[in-house]
Every structure is written in C-alpha cells, then in structure tokens.
Image: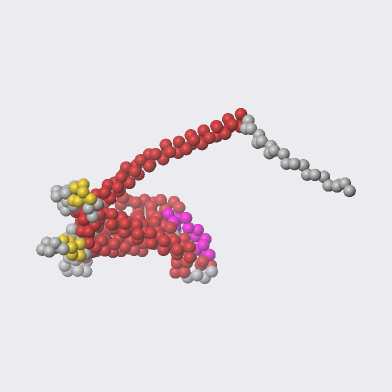
Amino acid sequence: MASTELAAPAPGPASPEPAPTPALSAAQAAQEQIEKQAGVRRWLLTAPALITVGIFGILPLIIIVIYSFLKAAPYGGVVWSPSVEAYVSFLFQTDIFTDELVFSPDFLQIYLRSFVFAVGTTAICLLLGFPTAYFMATRPPKQRNWWVLLITIPFWSNLLVRTLAIMFIIRDEGLLNNLLIGLGVIQQPITLLYTDFAIVLGLFYSFLPFMVLPLYASLEKLDFRLVEAGYDLYASRPKVLFRIIIPLAKPGIIAGCLLVFIPALGAYVTPLILGGGKHLMIGDLIAQQFGSGRNWPLGAAQALILMSAVLVALFFYVRATSGKVKHG
C-alpha cells in the first residue's frame, strides 16, 4: 500500500543576512561621530566645574586628611612621619608625671556646646522664620519682592560689621541697657555681652535669612486652595497648619535647617567677638590649633571629626524626615 504522506522537505542552509548597504554604513558612522562630538562637548562644558571642585574642594580635604595622620612640628607645620597622635590627643592627655594617657573631656565639651548652640539657633530661626516667610508668601505679588529685599539687606554689609554692631547694642553701656535704664525698667546695666546669650543672639541674627528664604520659596509655591478647603471642611487653624501647610513646606524647612545648622556649628567670628574668648566653639578651637597652638595635625583631626559628626547627624536627620514624609 503506497503511503500518501509527503516527506517534509529537508531544512536548507540559513539564508545569510543582507549585507549593509554603503549608505546605511555611512549613516551609522555619521551618527556615531555626532554622539562622540556631543560627549566631548559635554566633558568640555563640565570640565571647569570639575576642575574648580577638585582644586578648591577635594584637594584641600585630601591635604587635611594627610595632615591629620602626621606629627606636629615644634613651631608649626608638620613632620612627615605617620602618626595617630592627633586623634589620640583629642580624647586623652599625657600625664606630666607618669606619662600615662588620661581621659580629657575638654574638647568634647566644646563640641557639645557648639552642637547645643547650633541646634538652639536653628530652632529659634525656625520658630521666628516660619511666620515671617508665611507672611511674605501671603502678600500680594507686587509686594513680595520688597519683603525679600528687606530680608536680604543684612547681607549687604560684612559679617564682622554686623557682629560688632550687636556688640555695641548689648554691651553694658550699649543702646539696650541705656534704653532700659532710661525707661526705669532696670537700675543697673545687665551683663549680656560675653555670655552664651550673646553668642546665640549673634548666630540668630547672622543666619535668620538662611532660614527665611528657603521657607519663603516653598510657601510661595503652596496652593492656598488646599488651605481654604481645609477651613471649608471645618478644620481648626492648628490642624490646617500641621496637616496641610507644614507638610507641604517640609522641603523648605529641611533646607533652611541645614543652611542654618551647618554654618552655625562652625561659626568663628560671632563666638570670638560676642563670647570674648570665654565660650569657645569648634571654629575658634580649630583656628587656635593652626594659630597659637601650632598643632596642625590636631587642628586637621578636629576638623575631620567635626565633618564626620555633621555627616552622620545629617544622614539620620534626612532619613528620619524622609520617613515622616513618606508616612504622611
């Protein structure tokens, strides 16, 4: 019986891919050349910024790191010999009689004082800067630029001049004491200068605009129809503030807190003038090591410890605030 099934044709060899035409090859080459030129242009445009960051940002940091692991020269400078003495002397002092290392909390106390002053300054700037920024953001558009101008006027003068002005206001024979005595509020001048209050006051006055401007930038973009909707739903003023306004203004709050806390922590001029050298902060301490102390490795180590502490604090702060934003 003959089979009616047809045999399947044997598979033949795979057909070769068509060779690219000369026109297609030329187009691909031109496209690659254009992309290469665009990449070169991008590098040329970013090169000045990269060079600037490298020379003025990364290179000094590398030098500080290297200096912190060297020995101090007798009259300033460093001895090119590896040592961790700078980091050890941050927490320990050598006993002059037994040559034993003794724990010394002096530097830690200065760091703690600086953190307390910086946190206090940030909190005061936030408490007073937020209502100021909200007031500015709720003004008519034509008036807002004038309010921003008034906030930025202090930047027109040098920080040293502004700090000296505060000193002349709060000293024993200054404007404030003379005014209070003239009004009969006090009989004797109140000692305000060269105190912790004077330092915090100077820091607050110096860094308040750094809090107001980021807050104003966030609040200006706020859709106030959401606030009106909250009132329409019978929400009280505190609920509208904490449920609507503050969450929407949180990016400005975070930016303002960072812009105030970091420079306040390393402030130098304000504590030196208003504190009278009696209430050292980290900036003054580091300057002393590179100046009269003639211990460059210790100053470099103190600067790196400060930077590390700030980075750790900022990491946990940003992580906590980001978590609150997502949860909200």
* Whole-percent x, y for residue 300 in the image: 24, 52
Residue at 41% across / 51% down in the picture?
A: 145
Closer to us: 318 or 269: 318
In-image side of 60 versus 184 (left or right): right
What is the residue that sits farthest to the front in this orientation? 1
Closer to us: 41 or 213: 41
Residue 155 vertical position relative to residue 177 in the rendered view, above or below: above
Residue at 28% across / 54% down in the picture?
A: 304
Residue at 44% across / 69% down in the picture?
A: 238
Instruction: Say if the magenta span includes residue 228.
Output: yes
Closer to us: 144 or 75: 75
Q: Quadrant of residue 277?
A: bottom left
Is residue 172 visible in the rendered structure shown here? no
Predominant SS of the magenta segment: helix
Q: Describe the colour scheme in one phrase.
A: secondary structure
* Whole-percent x, y for residue 93 in the image: 17, 61
What is the residue that sits farthest to the left in this orientation? 97
Closer to us: 190 or 121: 121
Residue 73 vertical position relative to residue 170 in the rendered view, above or below: above
* Whole-percent x, y for residue 270 in the image: 24, 56
Residue at 24% across / 63% down in the picture?
A: 108
- Point out the stretch of residues depicted in magenta: 217-229
* Whole-percent x, y for residue 218 in the image: 44, 56
Instruction: Say if the magenta span includes residue 93.
Output: no
